[in-house]
Image (tube, rainbow, N blue to C red):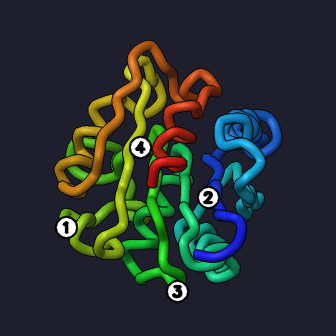
C-alpha cells in the first residue's frame, strides 16, 4: 500500500445517527489513530429506515473509491450490512482488515429479519486472509453481547474483543479499535 492508509467508517442506523451519535465514534477513532490516516465517513441513505439494497449499494461504491489496503469499519446495523455485503460479493479493493463494532447478529439466535439475515457460512464468504475483528461492549443494551458469540460461530477466524463496562456506542471510546487498526 502506498500513501495514507484509509479507513471507511459505516455508520449505524436511526434518525440523526450520522451527525448526533456515530460522529463521536469517528472523532474518537481519529484521535486514537493520529494524523497518519484518512477516515472516510459517508452518510448512508435513509439512515432512519435502512434497507439492505440501498445501503449495500452505497457501501460498495464507497469501497470502490478506496485504494487497496484500506480498513473497513462498521457500527451497529451498519456493521451488519457491511459484513453481509462483503460476503455477498467480494470487494473490488484489497482490504487490510474488517472491523465490526456492536454489530447486531441477524439470524438464528439473534435478531429476526429476512432482509439482513446473515449466511451460516459467513466467514468462508469473506475475503480470504483479511483479519476480522468483532468489538462488543458487555453493557450493550441495544445489541446484546451474546451477538458477538453468534458472529464468532459464523466467522470462526474472527477475533473477538469483549469490552467490560461499555455500551452500544462503546462509551464513544474507540481506543482499542485504533490500536488494532494500527497493528493490522
Residue drawn at the location 23% of the way across and 39% of the way down = 149
Say if mark 2 contacts mark 3, CB within 8 Å.
no
Residue drawn at the location 52% of the way across and 44% of the way down = 76
Tally of marks = 4
Residue 106, how many percent across, how many down?
A: 35, 51
Mark 2 and mark 4 lie on one chain; the one further toward the N terminus is: 2
In three-dimensional space, the C-alpha distance between marks 3 and 4, rounded to whole angstroms, equals 25 Å
Crowdedness near tag 2: few (<14), some (14–19) or many (≥20) residues, C-alpha within 10 Å: some
Crowdedness near tag 3: few (<14), some (14–19) or many (≥20) residues, C-alpha within 10 Å: some
Could you say which is closer to the camera, residue 103 or residue 126? 126
Could you say which is closer to the camera, residue 64 or residue 130? 130
Is residue 61 placed above or below 80 in the rendered structure? below
Which of the 4 image quarters holds residue 160? top left
Nearest-to-viewer mark from 3 and 4: 3
Mark 1 and mark 3 lie on one chain; the one further toward the N terminus is: 3
**Does the rendering let one see residue 12?**
yes
In three-dimensional space, the C-alpha distance between marks 2 and 4, rounded to whole angstroms, equals 14 Å
Please name the residue that numbered disc 1 is placed on: 121
Amino acid at each position: 500500500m502506498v500513501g495514507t492508509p484509509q479507513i471507511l467508517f459505516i455508520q449505524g442506523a436511526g434518525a440523526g445517527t450520522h451527525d448526533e451519535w456515530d460522529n463521536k465514534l469517528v472523532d474518537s477513532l481519529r484521535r486514537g489513530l493520529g494524523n497518519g490516516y484518512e477516515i472516510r465517513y459517508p452518510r448512508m441513505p435513509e439512515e432512519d429506515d435502512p434497507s439492505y439494497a440501498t445501503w449495500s449499494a452505497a457501501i460498495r461504491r464507497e469501497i470502490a473509491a478506496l485504494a487497496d489496503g484500506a480498513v473497513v469499519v462498521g457500527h451497529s446495523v451498519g456493521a451488519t450490512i457491511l459484513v453481509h455485503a462483503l460476503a455477498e460479493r467480494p470487494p473490488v479493493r484489497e482490504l487490510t482488515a474488517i472491523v465490526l463494532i456492536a454489530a447486531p447478529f441477524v439470524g438464528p439466535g439473534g435478531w429476526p429479519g429476512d432482509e439482513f439475515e446473515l449466511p451460516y457460512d459467513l466467514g468462508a464468504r469473506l475475503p480470504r486472509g483479511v483479519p476480522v475483528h468483532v468489538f462488543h461492549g458487555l453493557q450493550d443494551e441495544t445489541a446484546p453481547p451474546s451477538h458477538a458469540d453468534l458472529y464468532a460461530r459464523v466467522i470462526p477466524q474472527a477475533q473477538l474483543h469483549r469490552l467490560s463496562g461499555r455500551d452500544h456506542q462503546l462509551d464513544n471510546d474507540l481506543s482499542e479499535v485504533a490500536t488494532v487498526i494500527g497493528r493490522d
